[in-house]
Amino acid sequence: IMQGCNMKCTFCIVPYTRGGERGRPIADIVEEVRRLADRGVKEVTLLGQIVNLYGRHEFPAVDGKSPFVQLLEAVHEVPGIQRIRFTSPHPIGYKKDLIEAFTYLPKLAEHVHLPVQSGSNAILKKMHRPYTAEKFEELIERIRAAREGIAVTTDVIVGFPGETDEHYLETRAMFERLKFDNAFIFRYSKRRGTPAAEMEEAIQVPERVKEERNQDLLKLTNSFIYPRYEALVGSDVEVLCEGPSKTNEAKLTGRTRTNKIVIFDGNPARMTGQIFDVHIESTHGFTLYGQAAGVE
């Protein structure tokens, strides 16, 4: 729905390779969604580098609603579409109108991916991320309050230039408090042409320390993710079947509304593209296994 980015985070090359933000008109996007729905598509994902800031320089707010929320409402009205996702948003684009959208747009899937990048205010400032850790935590609380059972996932970078043990422990403490549903944990690596790559060598974090922090945060994150998967054993979850599993073509795969992967038996010709319940019988890693309920 848009290209480019104006944020210029110091670790990111996108603004220099893709230019400034440019959004497509709402009517064009909705027409594309209608064509997809006519072909049987039931789920769409709205894509943008800072997707929830879509159209902020080109299109006006209407009745206190940002262009992005206007777009969500318009896509929500398309017959046949049953799930709407978007990625990747930026914390500063999560205004009151977007959080409220989760209270009255049931097609919005119960999954928010919101990159935090660091739990340290000092590192967030070096990254040129214009929010504080405290504001981020408050934002997550408001999102979770808007929709029961919503899953929140994040991205984080460990070992950013200048990150001390104390800075890392601030990130770790944030993770202990927020208990994300999943997290993509990256070790900082230089990207030529970015401001962070030009930061003085004296504050670059050794690779050994990056790896230690990566593994520590991964272990912590898994400690509260796995029990959530185990809690789903014995329950029924709504799944959109995507077709044969990439790792076992004899099985089918799909995703829940909270974006969890489910593996099950079934007929790919009949079930691909359909939405139905799957009874969860077991879990391994970040994958659920079960049997489709009442579908042949």
Image (cartoon, rainbow, N blue to C red):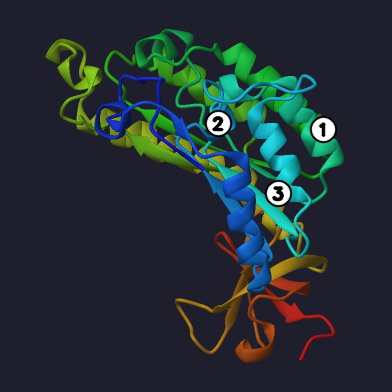
Residue 258: where, in percent of width, then height? 69, 52
> Which residue position is annotated with label 1?
146
> Which residue position is annotated with label 3?
75
Is 165 displayed left or right of 45 in the figure? left
Kindly indicate whether the residue at mark 2 contacts the one at mark 3 (C-beta within 8 angstroms): no
Instruction: Give how far apart the Cα atoms at labels 3 and 2 are.
Output: 14 Å
**Residue 109, visible in the rendered structure:** no
At x 40% / y 27%, what residue is drawn? 5
Is 187 displayed left or right of 263 in the figure? left
Judge the density around disc 2: few (<14), some (14-19), many (≥20) Cα neighbours within 10 Å.
many
At x 70% / y 41%, what residue is drawn? 72
Q: Is residue 122 above or below residue 175?
A: above
Q: Quadrant of residue 142?
A: top right
Mark sitting earlier along the chain (2/1): 2
Callout 1: SS: helix
Residue 238: where, in percent of width, then height? 77, 66
Callout 3: SS: helix
> Which residue position is annotated with label 2?
54
